[in-house]
Image (tube, rainbow, N blue to C red):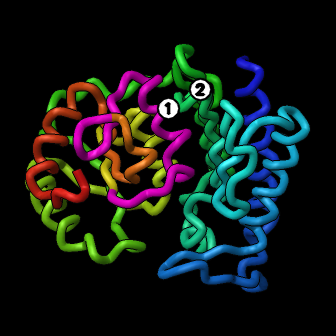
Amino acid sequence: MHPMLNIATRAARAAGDIILRNIDKLDRLTIEVKGENDFVTKVDRKAEEVILDALHQAYPDHGIIAEESGRFNQDSPYQWIIDPLDGTTNFLHGFPQYAVSIGLQHKGRMEVGVVYDPHKNELFSAARGDGAQLNGRRLRVTPRNGLNNALIGTGFPFKQPQYLDTYLASFKAVHPKVAGIRRAGSAALDLAYVAAGRLDGFWEIGLNSWDMAAGVLLVREAGGIVTDFSGKGDYLQTGNVIAAASKVYPALYDTIKPHLLDELK
């Protein structure tokens, strides 16, 4: 295994153990409100702490971009991008769709990605050029061609309500062309599911880099396509993403693009 992927895997599993130990303590957790529809608990913070400890011990000079702790060593060519609990709202409601997400960038290019679902004990992992895996089994995106009978994932712009009408227009365009649309509440897992062929595609407005850094590498290493809404690769900067199997992406992109505001493209 790629040595940095090995470290990321161990860190993700350690964070997952923290999450699992608190599943039966939800009624006792203190919940902080970071922003509109944006929550954090001591579980998020403790999970991030064990991830940071593992990374600092292995690579003390590497940079960090973490949801709860912010940025460190921004001048380093290596940047770890971390979401200790993607799907906090799901976790707080006992809805079992949440994950640990850890990605590594080197000079702006994603090199390593891990998305770990502790509830299902599913570990999605990828290293650039080495493919993507689920618990050691090689992943490939679906061979589906086009949107007919496709199952597509999405996310609502609940932190950016100013884009709700724009999002709904894109939803209405996609809806009649596919078999179904799912909104499960964890972008990291949605992207991992595209890589695994469980979803044929996915789109969302206004994500943070830590929501998708690991997931986009999974999709690409599983043979899929990931772009922002302009068809380029600036999704970590814009927060807007379309990811799909290679034969699904063109139809999904062409369906969504006409309904987006110019400021999102």
Count of labels in the image: 2
Instruction: Tell me what residue is drawn at x 24 percent, y 37 percent.
Output: 231
Question: Mark 2 = which residue?
Answer: 111
Label 2 environment density (alpha carbons within 10 Å; few <14, some 14–19, many ≥20): many
State which mark lies toward you, 2 or 1. 2
- Say which element carries label 1: helix
**Left or right of 146 on screen, residue 217:** right
**Left or right of 151 on screen, residue 117:** right
**Left or right of 233 on screen, residue 49:** right
Question: Is-magenta flag for residue 216?
Answer: yes
Instruction: Return the x and y of residue 36 as percentages of the image width and height.
Output: 48, 81
Which amino acid type is shown beneath numbered disc 1? Leu
**Left or right of 3 on screen, residue 101:** left
In the picture as drawn, the residue positioned furthest to the right comes out as 57
The reply to whether the C-beta atoms of the residues labelled 2 and 1 are less than 8 Å apart is: yes
Image disc number at residue 20: none
- Say which element carries label 2: strand
Q: Nearer the viewer, residue 137 or 219?
A: 219
Question: Is-magenta flag for residue 199?
Answer: no
Instruction: Return the x and y of residue 134 as percentages of the image width and height.
Output: 58, 30
Instruction: Tell me what residue is drawn at x 26 percent, y 70 percent.
Output: 163
Instruction: Return the x and y of residue 66 as percentages of the image width and height.
Output: 67, 54
Instruction: Tell me what residue is drawn at x 69 percent, y 53 percent.
Output: 71
Q: From what the image shows, is residue 124 above or below residue 259?
A: above
Question: Mark 1 = which residue?
Answer: 217
Magenta segment range? 205-232
Location of residue 94 by image quarter: bottom right
Instruction: Return the x and y of residue 242 as percentages of the image width and height.
Output: 30, 44
